[in-house]
Image (tube, helix red, strand yellow):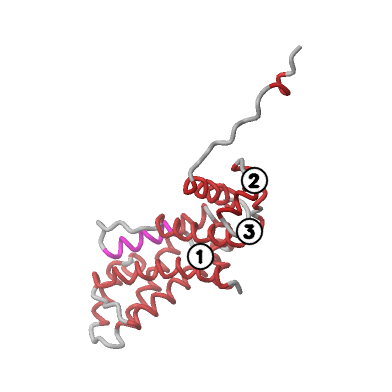
Amino acid sequence: MVDVAEDSPAPRRTRLGPAQRRAQLIEQGLELLADRPLEQISVDEVAERAGVSKGLLFHYFTSKHDYHVELVRCVGRDLVEYTAPDEDLEPIEMLRGTLVAYVDYVIRRRDMYISILRGATSGDPDMRAAFEDTRTALVDRTVAHLPAIGIEPTPAVRLAVRGWVAFVEDTTIAWLRDPELTRDEFVELAIAALSGVALAAHSLHSPAGGALSDRFREDTPAASS
């Protein structure tokens, strides 16, 4: 009787181009990151899942640290893309839709999200840089839409928006741990917070701050109820 297990050829490794192989290795890490912290992502396991040697993985990433940093960058880009605003909506509705997507992303990808935030407090400059790329993209996008409601992107406004993004990051984690507010209430809180800081920064050099504040309030359900 023939022993099929012994005589059958070993599965052949699929040959991929360099860009495809690198993308595959990143995808394997992101799948693992969906249910475990970044520090528990093993390059040995990633290589095994991808069907390659650890040496080949290190051909594309110089070290485990380099691989982890790239995962954080990819998560950041994914977050920015997932929360892209609907440009066809009115400014406040656009912001509301982005915040709803942001909260949904964090709920579904909690470990991924926390891996980004840890970059902010990391002593590692590469991790901090990866985090800053994500935060800067969110700040740039928010500031770019403020002129539609009459707020010019002055240095003060940009600084205020940066502080608001940090506020949303921190309070999102706090809300997940102790969700005393509904998701919609949390989103409205974030909208009101942006209104407050952006208008305060805008009013430093503009007498029209009061009128703009009224417009924000009219568009916010919590204020009109």
Q: Nearer the viewer, residue 200 or 78?
A: 78
* Residue 23 percent coordinates (x, y): 50, 49
Above or below: residue 214 compared with residue 31: below
In this view, the mark in front (1 or 3): 3
Percent coordinates x, y for residue 46 in the rendering? 62, 48
Does residue 194 appear to the left or right of 4 in the view shown? left
- The residue type indicated by label 1 comes to Thr
Q: Is residue 22 above or below residue 204?
A: above
In terms of secondary structure, where does tag 1 sit?
helix
Residue bearing the label numbered 3: 64
Quadrant in which residue 138 is drawn? bottom left
Q: Position of residue 166 (x, y in %)?
A: 47, 72
Frontmost residue, 215 versus 54: 54
Residue 53, label in figure: 2
Decide if residue 90 is on the left or right side of residue 115: left
Q: Can residue 203 be found in the magenta stretch?
A: no
The disc, 1 or 3, on the residue closer to the chain's N-terminal end is: 3
The residue segment tinted magenta is 91-102
Q: Is residue 101 magenta?
A: yes
Vertical placement of residue 224 versus 58, above or below: below
Compared with 76, 22 (above or below) is above
For label 3, count other residues whose C-alpha is less than 10 Å away and answer few (under 14), some (14-19) or many (20+). Answer: some
Label 1 vs label 2, nearer the camera: 2
As helix, strand or loop, the secondary structure at mark 2 comes to loop
